[in-house]
Image: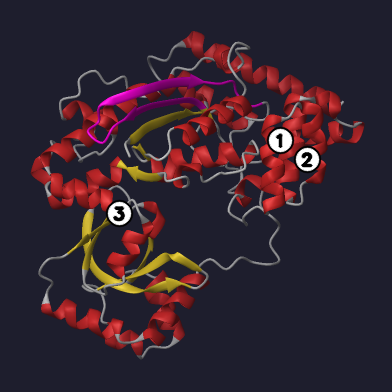
Amino acid sequence: MGFVFYDLETTGISPAFDQPLQFAAIRTDDSFVEIERVNLRCRIAPHIIPSPHALIVTGVTPAQLVDPELPSLFEFTQTIMEMTERWAPATWVGFNSIRFDEEVLRQAFFQNLQPNIYATQLNGNNRLDILTAVFAVWCRNPGLMHWPTDDTGRTTFKLDRLAPANGFNAHNAHDALGDVEATIHIARIIANGDPALWSAILHNRDKQNVMATLETFRPVELVLRFGGGPPRAYVGCFCGTAAGNPTNAAFFDLEAGDPEILIQADDAALFQAVDGTPQIIRSIAANKVPSLFPIANPNPDHLRKATLIAANPAFRARVGQAMAARYVEDPAASPPPVEKQIYSGFYSKADRDLLAEFQRADWSRRRDIVGLLTDVRLRQLGRRLIAFHAPEFMSVDEAEQYKAFLRERWNAPDAPGTEWTTIASAMRAIAELRAKPGGDREILDNMAAFIGVLMRGAHHARL
């Protein structure tokens, strides 16, 4: 089915509140022979303030952010969606993509009213993350690669050091296309150097394969990495699924706990096993390509414990309830920003059909379509898009609401819920960068001028 290796460069590190500025992809066959490549850029959306640190890393200038020759983010997402459909079926591959690039891409689809935010998982598509594969190499065949260190002497798994350490000397780091080429290089090393391991990694692309492996109740090895430490392998077995979420599997750590004790334990002790430290029962997202590997000759004690879990469906059901309880929302809490509601429910068929029409229509018709949507999230995002791209179709009240939205977003206080770059945080970042030796004064001055324009716009919006 072939691969689509891709990477995004973004305005910052928040998938919900930043946006892609560059999308690069190289489509290959199963042997990594290139078939096609694309390299796209877009303008910044009107409500987003870019992180100065992100601009320094990517080399994007304020002038490029508003270049009228570049497509809008809305048009950018339309082009990428067309590729996901034209290239299907394919495996979409990145480096740390499951945790970051994929989430950024989904948010871009969501916030720009694409009907299918899960495009890289449907129409025969699936996903793979080479960073997760690298962790598996570290644990299962460490001699396959050279392991670079960072400035403190600790092993680093960052692509900009890992690729050069393993023979990729043309790496243009922090450019999306350069990162794509480096990712292909690392994937080729794994596939050619350990075909059996690569085959096992590919097997986990399919959530049905993952669940089938788990539901044998045989001990398996799960490779994970936490914090800044090295990856490690955990031996465990299937222990049920979270209530209401069949792709969220429970993994009982057979070295950390004894199921015979927990089967007799009360609900509080069981919840501690799921949510406490050390964590005896872990969560595996079967649809996020976990590094899960069968064990040919399991330890007899591990087999005994796994057999006990297999024979106790009531215990597995209790585990599922404990896992679900970790994510119970406070009904009295204020609703989160619409960006954080991306997974709050699937669209109705009627709304999906309207969104498909929205993508093809002109802005006059799009204004009408927004009023027909039943999902409140989509209506809010649709009104935002009208404000961005067709303000002439806004009422006076809607225009005032849009100005208020910009004021509140740009001038939000420093608080845990403020996950986006504000005017104040951007100016602080520029000051920090100016204080560092070797900073490019012209670039920083241009950034400050760009933020200054936004500050004046926020001031006028109050008048």
Task: Check disc 3 and report its element: helix, strand or loop.
Answer: loop
Kindly check if marks 2 and 1 are in contact, taking CB atoms under 8 A apart as contact.
Answer: yes
Quadrant housing the C terminus: top right
Determine which of the numbered discs, if any, sits on residue 204 in the image: 3
Q: Amino acid at mark 2?
A: Val
Q: Give the Cα distance between marks 2 and 1.
A: 8 Å
Q: In the rendered view, would you say 328 is above or below 189?
A: below
Horizontally, residue 463 falls left or right of residue 183, namely right
Query: Magenta includes 42?
Result: yes
Tell me which corner region of the image, top left, top right, bottom left or bottom right, holds residue 96: top left
Q: In the rendered view, would you say 210 is above or below 433?
A: below
Tell me which label, 2 or 1, sits earlier in the chain: 1
Determine which of the numbered discs, if any, sits on residue 370 in the image: 2
Instruction: List the residue tagged with mark 1.
Output: 358
Query: Magenta includes 133?
Result: no
The picture places residue 357, in percent across and down from the top left corner, at 70, 37
The picture places residue 383, in percent across and down from the top left corner, at 77, 37
Sort mark 2 into few (<14), some (14-19) or many (20+) by Cα contacts within 10 Å.
many
Number of numbered tags placed on the structure image: 3
Q: Amino acid at mark 1?
A: Phe
Tell me which corner region of the image, top left, top right, bottom left or bottom right, holds residue 109: top right
Tell me which label, 2 or 3, sits earlier in the chain: 3
